[in-house]
Amino acid sequence: MTDILQTISSNKHFEGTLTKYKFKSAALGGLDAKFNLFLPANAANTKVPVLFYLAGLECTEDNGAQKGGFMRDAASEGIALIFPDTSPRGAGIEGEDNDWDFGTGAGFYLNATNAKYSRHYNMFTHVTMELPQIIEAAGLPIDFKRQSIFGHSMGGHGALTLYLASLSNTKQYRSASAFSPVCNATRAPWGKKAFEGYLMSGVEEAKGVYDATDLIAKTKEPVHILIDYGTVDPFLDQLHPEDFLKAARDAGHDEVQVRVRSQEGYNHSYFFISTFAPDHIHFHANFLKA
Amino acid sequence: MTDILQTISSNKHFEGTLTKYKFKSAALGGLDAKFNLFLPANAANTKVPVLFYLAGLECTEDNGAQKGGFMRDAASEGIALIFPDTSPRGAGIEGEDNDWDFGTGAGFYLNATNAKYSRHYNMFTHVTMELPQIIEAAGLPIDFKRQSIFGHSMGGHGALTLYLASLSNTKQYRSASAFSPVCNATRAPWGKKAFEGYLMSGVEEAKGVYDATDLIAKTKEPVHILIDYGTVDPFLDQLHPEDFLKAARDAGHDEVQVRVRSQEGYNHSYFFISTFAPDHIHFHANFLKA
């Protein structure tokens, strides 16, 4: 069954293997989709838990895999990592390559309802359903009953919203964390632009669905969330971590359930991410290996 | 005095700072030269020892800084890292951009004697003299009495040759290590091409000067060398680690002085390098902090 997935490259890394795969994605309208998968060495003997990493605007499946600094601790914890792309590529929609913060490289981890985008821009389904199904069908040794999710910036928005949305139904993820996430996307210029473009009813349609602050405000279940952001992040006006934190506390989630850490002097880069990468991996390991 | 160096970018990283600088390089014929410098947090209070990282063909000052995975351990050991570029850029010499393994991105850490290249292609002087002098003149808190050097591929050749060449005179470096180094450059196609191009008398001129195996064979002083290479490295025919090892043992350097490790299943990539990065940093720390 492994011929569902075509191997593009494979590299031994921290005693495990990082492999880049390609497949025809139904969720993305039949386009080729790529992702990176890190399997730790212990996956040779047993199914391992998995952590999804969602990258930010303009990124691909490679940024986190090459610059995140995640694999050293994932290898020692025995956790797999999946790095999806950030959008469909080559859909051929007019204007999709014009902006760095919309279209290609900017899928926002939603399912588009605007007819212009709805065939291809379905990163929500791609990440939550299609990737687990196709990886399982390919017979790779991952235990999808133990999933967690994290991400950066737009991908932090993705990680928080996918996690929180799943709590009231599938409970797909055990924990979520984020570096410099877009916490209140319906208030952020990047989010507004995405929602106005991808969704038939624009920002209104996103409220309560694709906004982490809206979601945490109405979440009753206990949560496991860690957020780090830098105090000199040049995109701080897009992030609103204080909104998320207030909504979480107002909804009764204490500092054990929701930790939001302000990191002095750090910015929005992978130099920031890799500094706190070990903390995030070990945070998720607590739940993935429980 | 810090205006000798122009700051291009600066990122907080593992509590320290990674800064990219630019300056007019006399050694490189007056061209702009760039380098990355990582200063650990303790450099705020004291001068710190320093480790040079020399990158391989086609790389710049960024590859090791972004993908090497060196800073986490350098930060905890309190060691600075300097990442030079791999050649002069924009010298305007006919043909210098035609090949990926010669000219731009392929300076081979030598001083050219062929008149066509001798004004600009002087990476030996750039790394061993110019960078320490200019960084010291800029008042940055580095103790150049405690230097070591490491590198990858062509940069592994550079690290080994610069270290060994210095032992009989300046003793500039305390230790050397390398990932997949070109160990016997006068026998390797990459090395031969470089020497025939940059040196007036070609490969003959390089023997005993720019060849790590020649150098270790005549080295009487005790040495501190660590080499890692992967068993599935696609460029293994360029590297000749077995030549270097034999020459080292024949010259009386035992496994404490020269360790050459074959790493099963690893290739030539930064996924290989970052896996063994912690070992190399701690190896050098033994000598830099002695």
Image (cartoon, coloured by chain):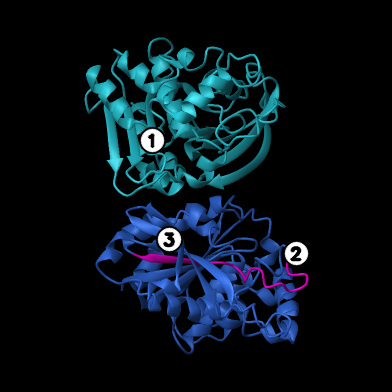
Chain colours: A blue, B cyan
Q: Which residues are magenta?
A: A79-98
Q: Which of the pair A175/A53 is nearer the observer?
A: A53
Indicate yes or no whether the magenta region holds residue A35.
no
Quick one: SS at disc 3? strand
Query: Which mark identifies residue A99?
Result: 2
Q: Chain of mark 1?
A: B
Residue A249 appears in view: no
Q: Is residue A255 left or right of residue A145?
A: right
Residue occupying the point 64% across, 14% down: B115
Quick one: SS at disc 1? helix
Q: Nearer the viewer, mark 3 or mark 2?
A: 3
Label 3 crowd bin: few (<14), some (14–19), many (20+), radius 10 Å: some
Label 1 crowd bin: few (<14), some (14–19), many (20+), radius 10 Å: few
**Mark nearer the N terminus (3 vs 2):** 3
Query: Which mark identifies residue B237?
Result: 1
Q: Nearer the viewer, mark 2 or mark 1?
A: 1
